[in-house]
Amino acid sequence: MITFTDVHKSFGPKKVLQGVNLEIPKGQSMVIIGGSGTGKSVALKSVLGLISPDSGTITVDGKDATKGDRDAFLARFGMLFQGGALFDSLPVWQNVAFRLLRGSLKRPRDEARDIAIEKLRRVGLTPDVADLFPSELSGGMQKRVGLARAIAAEPEIIFFDEPTTGLDPIMSGVINDLIREIVVEMGATAMTITHDMSSVRAIADKVAMLHDGIIQWTGPVGEMDNSGDPYLTQFISGSAEGPIEAVR
Amino acid sequence: MMVLTAPLAALGRATLAFLATIGQVTIFALSALTHIFRPPFYAREFANALLNIGWLSLPVVGLTAIFTGGALALQIYDGGSRFSAEAVVPQIVAIGMVRELGPVLVGLMVAARVTSSIAAEIATMKVTEQIDALTTLSTHPMKYLTAPRLLAALIVVPVLVGIGDIIGIYGGFLVSTQQLGFNPATYVRNTVDFLQQSDIISSLIKGAVFGGIAATMGCYYGMNSGRGAQGVGRATKASVQAAAVLILAANFLLTSLFFST
Ligand SMILES: Nc1ncnc2c1ncn2[C@@H]1O[C@H](COP(=O)(O)OP(=O)(O)OP(=O)(O)O)[C@@H](O)[C@H]1O
Ligand SMILES: [Mg+2]
C-alpha cells in the first residue's frame, strides 16, 4: 500500500503539489488522470525519491519512503518513464535486462538475454529488435522497450507514466491488457498515468484525478461516470465548458 | 544610493555563488573518490572509459607534443645563440617538456576532448531522465557513471603525459638533428644524463591530478546540467572552462610545491 499524506512540492514560485492525499491499496491498479502539467509525473517520482517533496509524507507499506535501505526499497519497483529514458549507449536487450545484469538480481548473461527477449515479446516486439540501439527505434517502440524494462525483474510495484501515448489503437489495447494481466496474475500494485480514457477503463480498479495540486476526486472506476464532480465530468467529456479553464 | 550599492551587491552575490560552487565541487570530488573504493565496481564501464580517455586521445596528444617539442627546440636554439648557449637545447627541451609543457598540454587536450564529451554525455542522460532511470534500477549514478571515468582518468592520463613527454622530446630531437646540426648520439646522451627521476615523477603526478580534474569537472557539470538542449550546451561549455582553468592553477601550485626550494 502506498499512502500520500499532505504532500506539497513547488519548483521556485510554481506550486505543483499542494496537499496531495491518496491511498493505493496493495494489488490494485490506480490510474491518475489530470491535465497536462498538473504534477502527475512529479507525484510518481516523489514516491521513488527522485524528487523530494517540500512537506508531507509518502509511505510504502507503512514505512517512510525516504528512510531505510534505498537499494532494497527500489528493488521492489519498476518504472516506465514518460519519455522512455532508455540508455542510448546500450542495445535494447541490455536496457531491458539492466537489472538482471548487475546488482542483487544478477544472473548469467544468456539467461538475462532470454528473459529480455521474452519481455520484448510480451510488449509486441520481435527478437530482432534486441540487438538494435534505442536510437534506431520509433517512438512507440522505445516506449514499449521502456515498458519491457519496467517489468523485466517482475517488481511488486509498477509505475507507468503514459504507457500508451504514441501507440496505435491495436498496440494500445495490447499494452492495456498486459498491464491488467500484470496486476491480476502477478498481484502487482500499479500506478498508471494516462490521458487515454479507454485505457483508464481497461486498466483501472480505482481512479484519481489531480487538479490544482490536490486530488479532486478518487473512487472506483465504475463510479467515474456518475461522480457528480464537475471537474471529473468535464475532464471525461473533454469539454471546454466547466470549472477547468482551457486557456487559449 | 541604490546606484552606488547595486554593483557591490552584484559583486557580493557573484562571490557567494562562486564560493558555493567551489564547495559543491569539492564535496562532489570527494564523494566521487570514495565511490572508486566501494563496491559494486562496473568493469565494462571502466574498460570503456580507459579506451575513450586513453587510447583514443593518443593521436591528438602525439601531434600536440611533437609540434611543441619541435618549436621549443627552435626557440631555445635561437634564444640561446644570443649568449652563445645553443648547446643547451637538449637539456632545456627535456626539462621544458617533462616538467611543464608535457603535463599542461596533455591536461588541456584531455580537458578539450574528454571533459567535454563526459559532460555532454552525462548532461544528455540527465535531461532525458536516464539518470533517474539508473537510480530506479538500483544503480548509483556516481558509481556507474562517475567512478569508472574518474578512476580511468587517474590511471591513464599520467600514461598519456609520459607518452607526450617522450614524443615532445623526440620532436625537439628531430628538429635539432635534422635542421640545427646536432649530433644524434650526443643529443640523446645529453637528454638522458640531464633528466632526473624527480622530473619524471613530478610529470606523472601532474598528469594524475590533471586527469582527475578533467574527469571530475565533466561529471560534475553533466550531473548538474540544466534542462533541455540549452542545459547540455551550458554544462559542456562550463565544464571545459572550469577544467582548463583549474588545470593551469593546479599546475602552478604543483610547480611551486615541487621546484621552488
Ligand atoms: N525538475 C523540475 N524542475 C522544475 N519544474 C519542474 C520539474 N519537474 C516538473 N516541473 C514542473 O512541474 C509541473 C508538473 O510537471 P509534471 O511533469 O508532473 O506534469 P504532468 O502532470 O506529468 O504533465 P503531462 O501530462 O504533460 O506529462 C510542470 O509545470 C513542470 O514545469
Ligand atoms: Mg507527465
Image: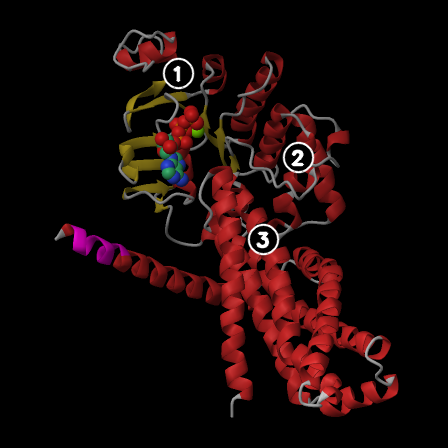
Q: CA distance from mark 1 to mark 2?
A: 35 Å
Position of residue A239 relative to residue A124, above or below, is above
Say if mark 1 contacts mark 2, CB within 8 Å: no
Q: Quick one: label 3, few (<14), some, or many (20+) residues within 10 Å?
A: many
Q: Position of residue B19 (x, y in %)?
A: 34, 63
Q: CA distance from mark 1 to mark 3?
A: 51 Å
Residue extending farthest front: B82
Q: Amino acid at mark 1?
A: Val
At 25% from the left and 13% from the top, the residue drawn is A243
Mark 1 or mark 3, whichever is nearer to me: 3
From the viewer's perspective, tell me whether residue A242 is left or right of residue B237: left
Q: Which residue is mark 3?
A: B116
Position of residue A124 relative to residue B171, above or below, is above
Q: Which residues are magenta?
A: B3-10
At 73% from the left and 75% from the top, the residue drawn is B74
Q: Amino acid at mark 3?
A: Ser
Is A51 or B172 nearer to us in this picture? B172
